[in-house]
Amino acid sequence: MTPQFDLSFIQNNFPITGNYLGYTVKNDGHINATFVLHFEENGKKSDYTVQRINTNVFKDPDALMQNIVGVTSFLREKIAARGGDPDRETLCFLPAQDGKYYATDANGDCWRCYRYVDDVYTCNTIDSAEVFYNSGLAFGAFQKALADYPAETLAETIPNFHNTYSRFLDFETAVQENRSGRRDTVAAEIQFVRDREADTHVLLDLIEKRELPLRVTHNDTKLNNILFDSKTNQGICIIDLDTVMPGLSLYDFGDSIRFGANTASEDEKDLSKVSLSLPLYKAYIEGYLHTAKDSLWAREIEYLPFSAKLMTFECGMRFLTDYLNGDTYFKTEYPEHNLVRCRTQFTLVADMEKKMAEMQKITAEAAKA
Ligand code: GN1
Ligand code: MG
């Protein structure tokens, strides 16, 4: 079912002016419902992105929006100080009538609104190593820009978000409960997860031993969360800031590879098309290290290839968990959608396991450059 928004509610609550021309639905995200609303004023077009916040996932919209407005205000100042364009290089959220950065409608749904950035494009798959190199530059720069952000002021919008062991326990609960009745049809996938339980502890143990630092990270560094400038192909703006929280640089690096260095899309049904592209891995790591290397610890660099595998595994396990629970978390377009996604992720994990030595070699070479 296509979700809907109420135009007059949006216009009454947010400072939008101009004549309404129409809207476009954005279907890239799996969590919030997103629309771009088109307006025109004095012959000039101005667009706004309007989102219904998924409060099933983000249970405290006040804390969520405080995080986001805190981070975007901080970034605006830095961008302006270095002579950049804050209106293009970070998101600009509009305050609602009551001064909060979201408004609640009669159904209890929470809506937010931000200026749409013009002359940009997003990607769901990538075939140009150059564009992926630019993604690495952009996410590395984002992490660096937030290095001195006061992390203690950030709320944990989703507790244990990338705690892979906690995700594993959620998975085991879902297997036990079998709420969807689908358990017997996914025995191979369940075994695939159980065979890799040991991996779920690796980064957590290193945090415990203080061998990896907590940083302010994005935590959802999918390729389609970067806006690329249509003219320069540079990644100019990082979007989807819902999960900006203290985390590991490795979560961000790993998730970028999971999504962007896959030779197929996240929900490709033909698994023979799914693999890790080593040239894309190389391009991304070169871009990422170019901007982030100076701030990284040796241990972080050492675990970059492992993090790609771990984030892919964790994501596949989350899709499988949701499939077992009856599709209550991720948006799905058809009944097997979460299972299809799970299978692409596990195919990619298996391919990374085969290519791990090569990934390590590329990593060491990129770190020396
Ligand atoms: C969700 O919102 P979106 O589609 O960028 C999810 C990520 C997953 C991703 C898988 C808050 O991200 O953690 O990696 O789907 N976001 C949340 O595509 O759970
Ligand atoms: Mg997201």
Image (cartoon, grey):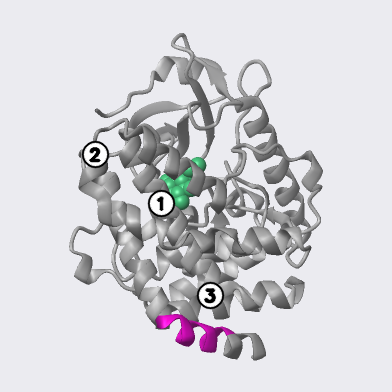
Q: Is residue 351 above or below residue 197?
A: below
* CA separation in Å, label 3 and label 2: 33 Å
User: Where is residue 363 drawn, in percent x and y?
Assistant: 56, 83
User: Where is residue 250 drawn, in percent x and y?
Assistant: 61, 64
- Residue at 56% across, 54% down: 238
Going by the numbered disc 2, the residue's amino acid type is Arg
Of the image marks 3 and 2, the number of the one nearer the N terminus: 2
Of the image marks 2 and 1, the number of the one nearer the N terminus: 2
* CA separation in Å, label 3 and label 1: 19 Å
Q: Which of 53 and 302 is in front in this view?
A: 302
User: Where is residue 68 drawn, in percent x and y?
Assistant: 65, 39
For the C terminus, the image quarter is: bottom right
Q: Look at the numbered discs 3 and 2 and tell me whether their residues touch, using CB distance below 8 Å.
A: no
Q: Which of 289 and 239 is in front in this view?
A: 289
- Residue at 47% across, 38% down: 46
- Residue at 35% across, 34% down: 325
Q: Residues in magenta?
A: 355-363
Going by the numbered disc 3, the residue's amino acid type is Pro
